[in-house]
Image (cartoon, rainbow, N blue to C red):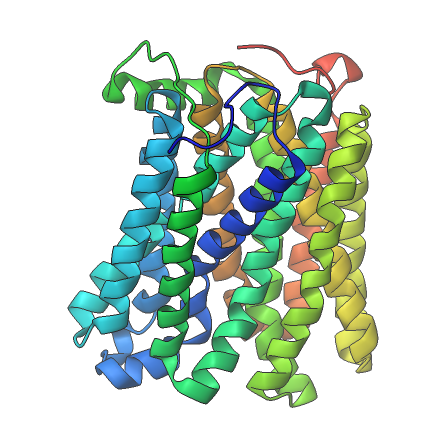
């Protein structure tokens, strides 16, 4: 079955909801292990020096999948590619669930990361199915679902593992992905690209886009910094909440759940982008992110938990808003290269996020939350100064075609 009429410029509200849910439950698989590293390491007798690999290998797999697989959307029929990745994710999660040795678990975790990039194949497909005047709104709604999946993954994993053990998390996720495969098989439309190159030249072309597109380079820089400081915050804040406020793991999970409210900004940002306010949203996102970091630094020192929650929500909202407008911009650069553009963009964004996670832990252990918040605000300021060098004639509202 090939689903509804796969006409360009036609994506119903129900299909938009399906895309959003699928993206959310798929990308959540990258983040479950962040809350489960301790129990998994103890159960599988992972040596202490390798415990960090429980989280890192999943993220490395996702990074590899972003570069090597997402660009295939430009040469392989998109429905088939998405179903293959979803099936691979089902099998990989089963490997994690049934693993009894560190080697099998780590290998399966890497495969989970690789196959989770199916969500990033769906985003360019959604832009192909959407009329140009509504692409920002559609991307915003879909990314709202994706970000909700990211934000809910950690507290959900903590809750399930606390009551039923860490394997229950992956059992539930595997069941969700089986249901997702069945849903996509039934409703996902086909899209047949017109390939003009093989796989090797495709990857070379992905790298070439970084050279020829100034808009792509700027957008990935802006969002790479914002996603980096986003990961800095969510790496450092659980440590600070435990040390400064004495919160338990369950209370920290509740804090993360409150922070998920920032995902509500995604549809609103998409609508603003459709109305031609891309530059405004980007500038506001950077200013709000910088202010959120400054406020979080004060709130931690003053013991103002409520203010800290608001800072978390506004930081998340700023990062997601800029992500929406940036993806709308890059998906408008070329009708035939959307997969490669998204692959290049998301690979760099993910590298920024990984660097932010490392920097968040490093700054906290060497200078406490004060150094972490100062570093986060400083990085956003540098990005804002770069953004201010951009002339109106640079084409950010109507980016160059490539």
| Location of residue 401 with respect to 129 vertically, above or below | above
Q: Position of residue 64 (x, y in %)?
A: 32, 43
Left or right: 306 in relation to 129: right
Left or right: 197 in relation to 329: left
| Location of residue 321 with respect to 377 vertically, above or below | above
Nearer-the-camera pick, 69 or 98 = 98
What residue do we see at 74% from left, 53% from top? 264
Left or right: 250 in relation to 378: left
Residue 386 in view in this figure: no
Marker count (numbered): 0
What residue do we see at 46% from left, 30% from top? 189
What residue do we see at 65% from left, 90% from top? 246
Q: Position of residue 167 (x, y in %)?
A: 34, 77
Q: Position of residue 67 (x, y in %)?
A: 36, 35
Nearer-the-camera pick, 94 or 100 = 94
Residue that protrudes farthest toward the front in the picture: 1
Nearer-the-camera pick, 382 or 333 = 333
Nearer-the-camera pick, 284 or 18 = 18
Tell me where residue 241 sits by quadrant: bottom right
Q: Position of residue 47 (x, y in %)?
A: 23, 79
Tell me where residue 329 sits by quadrant: top right
- In what quadrant of the picture does the N terminus appear? top left
Tell me where residue 129 sits by quadrant: top right
Residue 245 in view in this figure: yes
What residue do we see at 54% from left, 17% from top? 213
Left or right: 366 in relation to 94: right
């Amino acid at each position: 079955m090939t689903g509804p009429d796969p006409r360009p410029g036609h994506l119903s509200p129900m299909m938009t909801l399906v895309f959003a849910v699928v993206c959310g439950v798929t990308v959540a698989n990258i983040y479950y292990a962040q809350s489960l590293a301790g129990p998994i390491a103890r159960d599988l007798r992972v040596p202490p020096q390798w415990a960090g690999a429980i989280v890192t290998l999943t993220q490395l797999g996702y990074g590899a999948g972003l570069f090597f697989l997402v660009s295939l959307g430009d040469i392989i029929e998109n429905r088939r590619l998405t179903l293959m990745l979803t099936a691979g994710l089902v099998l990989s999660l089963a490997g994690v669930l049934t693993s009894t040795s560190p080697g099998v678990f780590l290998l399966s975790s890497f495969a989970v990361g690789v196959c989770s990039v199916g969500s990033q194949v769906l985003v360019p497909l959604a832009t192909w199915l959407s009329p140009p005047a509504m692409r920002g709104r559609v991307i915003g709604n879909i990314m709202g679902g994706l970000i909700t999946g990211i934000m809910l993954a950690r507290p959900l994993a903590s809750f399930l593992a606390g009551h039923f053990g860490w394997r229950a998390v992956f059992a539930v996720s595997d069941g969700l992905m089986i249901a997702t495969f069945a849903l996509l098989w039934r409703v996902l439309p086909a899209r047949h690209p017109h390939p003009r190159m093989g796989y090797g030249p495709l990857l070379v072309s992905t790298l070439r886009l970084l050279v020829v597109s100034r808009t792509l380079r700027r957008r990935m820089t802006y969002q790479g910094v914002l996603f980096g400081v986003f990961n800095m915050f969510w790496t450092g804040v659980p440590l600070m909440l435990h040390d400064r406020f004495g919160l338990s793991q369950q209370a920290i999970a509740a804090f993360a759940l409150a922070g998920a409210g920032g995902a509500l900004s995604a549809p609103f940002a998409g609508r603003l982008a459709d109305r031609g306010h891309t530059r405004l949203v980007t500038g506001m996102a950077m200013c709000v992110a910088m202010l959120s970091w400054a406020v979080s630094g004060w709130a931690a020192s003053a013991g103002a938990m409520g203010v800290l929650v608001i800072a978390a929500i506004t930081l998340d909202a700023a990062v997601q808003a800029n992500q929406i407008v940036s993806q709308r911009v890059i998906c408008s650069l070329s009708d035939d290269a959307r997969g490669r553009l998204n692959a290049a963009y998301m690979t760099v964004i993910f590298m920024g996020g990984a660097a932010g996670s490392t920097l968040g832990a490093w700054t906290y252990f060497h200078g406490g939350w004060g150094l972490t918040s100062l570093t986060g605000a400083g990085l956003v300021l540098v990005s804002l100064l770069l953004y201010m060098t951009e002339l109106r004639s640079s084409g950010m509202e109507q980016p160059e075609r490539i």
